[in-house]
Amino acid sequence: MAASVGNAARLAQRLKELREGRPGLTQNLLAGALSTEARVAAATLSSWESANNPKTPTPTRLEAYARFFAVDRSFDGRRAHLPTHAELRDNPDDLLAYDRLHAELVELLQGEDVIEAETGQRTLLDFDDGDIVIICPDAPTDSRGPLAVDASPNYTLLHQFADTDALIEVFGHIRALNPERKVYYRTSDSVSRNEIQNHLVLIGGIGWSRTTRRVLSLIDMPVEQIDHPDLDTGEVFRLTKSGATEERVFFPVTDEKTGELTEDVALVARVSNPFNSNRTLTILNGIHSRGVLGAALAVTDETIRTGNQEYLGERFPVGNFALLMRVPVIQGKVIAPDFKNARARLFEWAADEEAE
């Protein structure tokens, strides 16, 4: 039996109080400390503290919380450390504080006998180690404004980038999830040889990015992006024919009367970096820029990302995958796609299922 909503909410409030009672202790720092025993993402901690839709930690996680918050020395204002049982036993006062806090946390859920298992999630933009390089397309020269000219006293580098809406979403989210990592953003033409061997996040498609076109050509997955004579405003996605799939081409949808874009197509994928198998390649792509933004919002938008992370955790807990989806566009505004909505999913692929 799962924990009741009321009990889960009370526990979520208490966990948040404990963390906020240590000034400077962020969810990222606490997640890092708890991960010394079993990895947990900061986004998962956020779900444990959620006031609206709380998820409940497993008994093992709850016990680790009690150990961490039982002693002041677990956080010195900069670094977080999860004390071991042996460390607590060295001081009777610490052990007593641990026993009391652990009992309190468990008691918050005594209305139900079994604590709800934590929801498995997969957070694409949370990286274990190494630098992270975001690559965006170069904006076409004829689309750049005067602020993109080096000689301008008001020169602004970002005016050289395409898909800057998606870049801002992704860059901010990666920095928040990876405070100890170095995060760079580059245009397709400015990325260096060394940078391309880090964790790569490719934003945008092949039309304005030679680097993206080259990288995608090296990836063995059944989804590719191609130029198509029936569409001159972007590049469509095509499923390559194989023993498991028939060839299909996916187009955006426009209003028949106004010609306004009402639905784009986006690709979210995670594979190994073809230039360094110890690093990852994350793809956030679309037919148009609105599709690219939809792919970014699917993993960054606070209203939808937890559910999407849960879907990825259930459907693709590990390994390479690709998810092709519809991106609704309402009055020009991009709506983050919901992975759990069957209609939103056009195609999905997992590398470890190819042989089945």
Image (spheres, grey):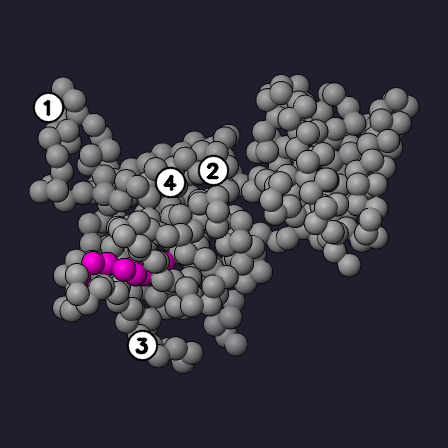
Q: Is residue 20 above or below residue 321?
A: above
Does the stretch in magenta take in 279? no
Does the stretch in magenta take in 266? yes
Say which of marks 3 and 4 sits in front: 4
Q: Quadrant of residue 72?
A: top right
Q: Earlier in the sequence, mark 4 or mark 1?
A: 1
Spatial separation of the CA atoms under disc 2 and disc 3: 37 Å
Of residues 74 and 87, the one nearer the viewer is: 74
Q: Secondary structure at mark 1?
A: loop
Q: Amino acid at mark 3?
A: Glu
Q: Residue at x 33, y 71 (%)?
A: 239
Say which of marks 1 and 2 sits in front: 1
Q: Secondary structure at mark 4?
A: helix
Q: Position of residue 230 (x, y in %)?
A: 15, 69
Q: Residues within 10 Å of mark 3 (few under 14, many from 20)?
A: few
| Mark number, residue 352 | none
| Mark number, residue 151 | 1
Residue underneath mark 4: 169
Residue underneath mark 3: 247
Spatial separation of the CA atoms under disc 4 and disc 1: 29 Å
Spatial separation of the CA atoms under disc 1 and disc 2: 35 Å
Q: Position of residue 289 (x, y in %)?
A: 26, 50
Q: Earlier in the sequence, mark 1 or mark 2?
A: 2
Whether tag 2 and tag 3 are in contact, CB under 8 A, the answer is: no
